[in-house]
């Protein structure tokens, strides 16, 4: 013998149990990677008269991220940066974000 009416059953199983979650917003490294994939030869950064493309910036950040991971950077870690303003600072910030560190 059913304990719940059809409407109550639907409310419990469908309405109250709606576990669908909106997709998570992309992270900054994911957004950057998408842009680098779309426009690899576009200028991403100009520093001290030198232009760097998205592909070059991404490759440099990936290399630096590997070095940082080897040194222990990753999620739940904090990386301190002490660099002058310029392309190396941007590369380092992007590399830290690619490791998942702060």
Image (spheres, rainbow, N blue to C red):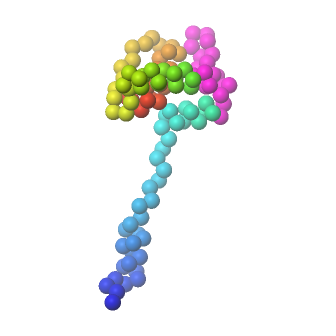
Front residue of 97 and 71: 71
Which residue occupies 63% across, 33% down? 37
Is 50 situated above or below 17? above
Q: Residue furthest front?
A: 70
Image-quadrant location for residue 1: bottom left
**Residues drawn in magenta:** 38-57
Residue 44 shown in magenta: yes
Percent position of residue 72, x then y: 36, 25
Is 2 situated above or below 27? below
Image-quadrant location for residue 68: top left
Q: Residue furthest bottom?
A: 1
Q: Residue furthest right?
A: 41
Q: Quick check: 40 left or right of 97?
A: right
Image-quadrant location for residue 20: bottom left
Percent position of residue 51, x then y: 63, 16
Q: Tell me the quadrant of the picture where the C terminus can be found.
A: top left
Q: Quick check: 77 left or right of 58?
A: left
Query: From this viewpoint, is residue 44 visible?
Result: no
Query: From this viewpoint, is residue 60 visible?
Result: yes
Residue 33 shown in magenta: no
Percent position of residue 56, x then y: 60, 21
Which residue occupies 43% across, 13% down? 83
Which residue occupies 48% across, 37% down? 27
Front residue of 24 and 65: 65
Front residue of 46 and 97: 97
């Amino acid at each position: 013998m059913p304990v719940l009416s059809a409407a109550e059953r639907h409310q419990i199983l469908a309405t109250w149990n709606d576990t669908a979650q909106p997709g998570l917003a992309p992270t900054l490294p994911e957004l950057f990677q998408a842009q680098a994939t779309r426009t690899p030869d576009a200028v991403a950064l100009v520093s001290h008269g030198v232009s760097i493309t998205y592909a070059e910036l991404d490759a440099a950040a990936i290399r630096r991220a590997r070095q940082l991971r080897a040194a222990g950077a990753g999620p739940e870690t904090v990386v301190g940066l002490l660099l002058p303003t310029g392309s190396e600072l941007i590369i380092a910030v992007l590399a830290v974000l690619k490791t998942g560190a702060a």
